[in-house]
Structures are given as C-alpha cells and as structure tokens.
Amino acid sequence: MRESGPDVEAGYVNVFQVTSTRDEIVLLLGERQPMGEDPEEVRARLKERIILSPFTAKRLAMMLGSCLRDYESRYGPLDGKRLPSTEPDQVNLPRQKLPSFRREIAGEKARLVLQLVENLNIRFGFEQSFKIFEKALLASRFLLGLEKKRIREEHHERIVDICRRMDMPENLLHAYRGRLPDSSYLYFGFEESERACLYKAYLEFYDKFKTTMETQPRRFDSFLMHLGFKWDALDNSRQALTRYTWYPFLPMEVMLKRLSNLLDPHKFGTLFEIAKGLVEIASRTVPFYNIFYMEVDEENNPRKSFDINMYRAKLPLSKLQPWLSRMFRHYGIPSEEFHALYDGVQDKTFGHIAGGIDREGRDFLTVYYGLEYKDGVTP
C-alpha cells in the first residue's frame, strides 16, 4: 500500500483501547487530554474508531511486532526489554507465497489453512496449480503437504483439530479420523472458484503401499493412494469424498491405453493429446516407473479423471510451453491471460497434470507445479 493523494490524513495518537467480538476487532485511537481533578483518570479525545476482521488484526499485530523488533535492533530495546520473537524455531513458508484471491472472505479462509499448518512448527511443502475449463481459468489454488511422523506429540488429535477448525463436515471428519492411522503424508488445500471456496484435506497411504509390496509383491496391480475430503468453506453441506487409485509401474504404452479408455480420444482428443505429449517429454528424462498414473472418482457425481505425477522428471514449465499454450487455446482462454500466468511461473518445476470430467460434468485440465520447501528441496 502506498500513501498518495489529498484524501490521506495524518494524525498523532498516544492512547488506545482494543475491544473484540467473535467477528471483529475494534481499535479506539485517541489523544491524551490534560488531567482532571483525579490524577489516576486518563482523559482522551477519540480520534478514530477502526474495525478489523480477526485475520486482518492478526496480520497487523504481526507486522507491528516485526517493525518493533527491527526498530529495537537498530536503536536499542524499549523500556529496557526487547520485544520477544514470535517466530517458530522452524521457519516455514512466508505468507506472501499465497496466491491472490478475488474475495476477502476467500483470502481469510485460505490464510486460516496456512496458519493452522504453520502452528505445527514443522517443515511442510507448498504447491500451486491452475485449473482450466471452457472460458475459465482458476489460479487461486494451493496445497500444503507434510509428513505425519514429524508432528511431535498427539499427532492424530492435532490433525483432527485442524480439520475441525476448517469446519470439516462431521460425516467426513468421522471417515477421515478412521483412515488417519493408515496414512503417512497429509495435505491441506484451498481453492477459490467462480462460485465457491473449497477446502481440501488429503490422506496419503504410500508407506502402507511399500509395506505391502515388501511382503506381498504380487498382491495387486492397483492401490488406493489418496483419499480426498473436500467441502465448501462457506457451506459445508456441499462436500465430496474423492478416491485416487494408483496403477504402479505402468509402461508408457499401458498408461496411455488406460488413459484412452478413461478419455475417449474421439470425444476428448485434445485432452488426450496434451496428456500424452507431456508424458512423452517426461519419459525422455526418467524411466517409466518414475511417472505415477492415478485414476480419480467420486460417488454420486459424474467425476471421472486422471492424475499423472511427473515431478521426478524435474522439468521446468518453460519446457512445456507449446503444450500449455495449446491447452489455453483449446479452452478459449485469451493469450494475455496465458502470458500473465505463464511468464511468472515458467521457471517453476512441473509437477503433475490432472484432467477429465469434473463433478459438474465439465471437461477440464489442471497443472500442478512448484512443490517446494523453505530450503528448496523438491521430490
């Protein structure tokens, strides 16, 4: 924010009061007046009454704290004591990593997810994505990932508490709690669409897969890798439970065969060709068993899609520019919107592509990219 124009007013205050309700924080700012007959009575002239949402107030408190610590590092402690640091021992991702949101309520819901994960004080990953369908581009999306065993104590209860704080519906919470002990990795996400704000909580069962493979290597040719619990952050009666079934170690021709069975190339030819093109590029860099193919479904809606993870190929998005450009053209996204997004992320690492039919019956493609930790480690 920048000061400019004649409407900006400056004023001096030296007394304040803070009050709060569940929905707002109120700052009363004033100027001390000459004392009256009672020397213990503080007299002040009210100059401003400022109303903040709790999230805005917390950001203000953090910025004030940071500014005061910087002041004391330069000019010495105030009142003989330095302001204590509020930074956790483990530094995680800065808040400015979050994408921008069109609505203030969406920004608040998104910041809640980040705050809850940060409060665990453990290392976590941050991934962004963009989803496109006919005439629409959704880029206000992110995912936070963490390893469950890093949580120091009562990890199951702390994770369930995060879900409660995100207002996960009770039926989903019951199912989530039941499968939580089998999981090894956890993910929490948020996205803003044209009509909703969507919360997501995923359980990943990779360690269970490894154990099964070691003891019964020929038991299966598919494995339930993730469960996704999703609900509208503004109306949690709108919800879905998503299953991600992994087909491990598929040769590329088998993978593409499954993909063609899922997406009829005659009906969804462009989607198929884009996915095929990206897989072919990745296969030049890594062996087929490092490309992870999953099929995705949900009960009681038409969702039918795929997710192909290619992080191990370590491809920058710039290597995929022709396919990304074709993707945007196919869905009628203007060139200027493509470049507004692409130019800022082209150096990020391509992660995975998802696509197919969504729960509203629309065909779509989603590109995930840039999974990173504070120390820059990528999988």
Image (cartoon, rainbow, N blue to C red):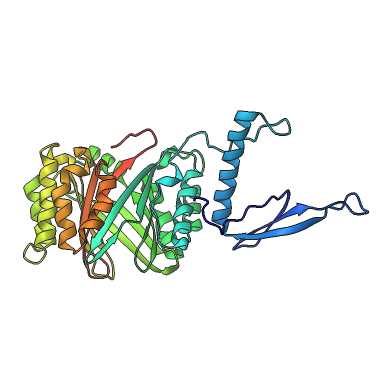
User: Left of 24 or right of it: where is 31?
Assistant: right
* Quarter of the rendering occupied by the C terminus: top left
The residue nearer to you, when weighing 1 against 117, is: 1
Q: Residue at 36% of width from left, 51% of height from top?
A: 142
Residue 79, compared with residue 59, is above or below; it is above
- Residue 67 x, y percent position in the rendering: 58, 39
Give the side of residue 314 with respect to residue 280, left or right: right
Residue 128 in the image, given as x and y percentages of width and height: 32, 49
Residue found at the far front of this picture: 6
Number of residue marks: 0
The image quarter in which residue 100 lies: bottom left
Most extreme residue toward the right is 37
Residue 271 image position (x, y, % from top left): 14, 59
Vertical placement of residue 53 versus 348, above or below: below
Res 184 visible? no
Q: Is residue 333 visible?
A: yes
List x then y, in percent, for residue 102.
40, 61
- For image coordinates 61% across by 56% down, the residue present is 9
Front residue of this view, candidates 84 and 279? 84
Image side of residue 158 versus residue 330, left or right: right
Give left or right: position of 89 versus 202.
right
